[in-house]
Image (cartoon, rainbow, N blue to C red):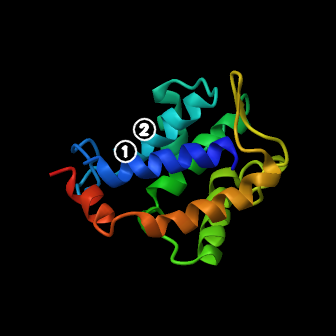
Amino acid sequence: MPAFVDTCAMRLTHLRVERFRGILNLDWHVPDRLTLPFFEAYFSNVIEGTEFSIEEAEAIVESGAIPDERPEDAHDVLGTFEAVHDLALRAATPATLEELFELLERRHRLVMGGRPDKRPGQFKEKANQAGSYVFVAPPLVEGTLVEGFKRLADLPPGLARELASSSS
């Protein structure tokens, strides 16, 4: 079994026994429901190497305008914001493997839609790497997702309720 699947199995075991400690705020009914999606879009792109100031990223998200000097980074921030700001898409959870792959494709198309060179909606052909760590090899991605999806059935039924109630 690949090391990544072992890691997923350990995390699954952790989820079975660890109680969430209220670190998540999933209340999407608060008036300012733009803040969390903005910062998620901003910081997830900072992790990827984007170097916009918060003010620059805010202007991109508010106006939808893509600056000429850094269009790829701007498309990434805007696409990520659109994906995490869409409440229905964010809340969607697949019931079947087919729905899982459809949802992943839809989200990826939205996030990477401004970057046709990144093949929006398709799996990568080259593995991601962070430092010396190489993530799942492209030929193993679909199988890894299938195995992970199968293991969801092993999670306790109250996990979703626990996530939702952990902010209270």
- What is the secondary structure assignment of the residue under circle 2? helix
Residue placed furthest toward the left:
168
Residue placed furthest toward the front:
1
- What is the secondary structure assignment of the residue under circle 1? helix
Check whether the beta carbons of the residues at disc 2 and disc 1 lie within 8 A of each other: yes
How many other residues sit within 10 Å of disc 1, few (<14), some (14-19) or many (≥20)?
some
- The three-letter amino acid code for the residue at tag 2 is Phe
User: Residue placed at 20% from the left, 57% from the top?
Assistant: 165
Asked whether, in this view, residue 124 is left or right of residue 145, the answer is right
How many other residues sit within 10 Å of disc 2, few (<14), some (14-19) or many (≥20)?
some
User: Residue placed at 73% from the left, 28% from the top?
Assistant: 69
86 or 69: nearer the viewer: 86
User: Residue placed at 45% from the left, 55% from the top?
Assistant: 85
Q: Position of residue 33 (x, y in %)?
A: 32, 52
List the residue tagged with mark 1.
36
* Residue 87, numbered label: none
Asked whether, in this view, residue 59 is left or right of residue 22, the answer is right
Q: Position of residue 22 (x, y in %)?
A: 21, 45
116 or 12: nearer the viewer: 12
| Residue 154 is at least partly visible in this image | yes
- The three-letter amino acid code for the residue at tag 1 is Leu
| Residue 64 is at least partly visible in this image | no
List the residue tagged with mark 2.
39
Q: Position of residue 107 (x, y in %)?
A: 61, 60
Asked whether, in this view, residue 102 is left or right of residue 34, the answer is right
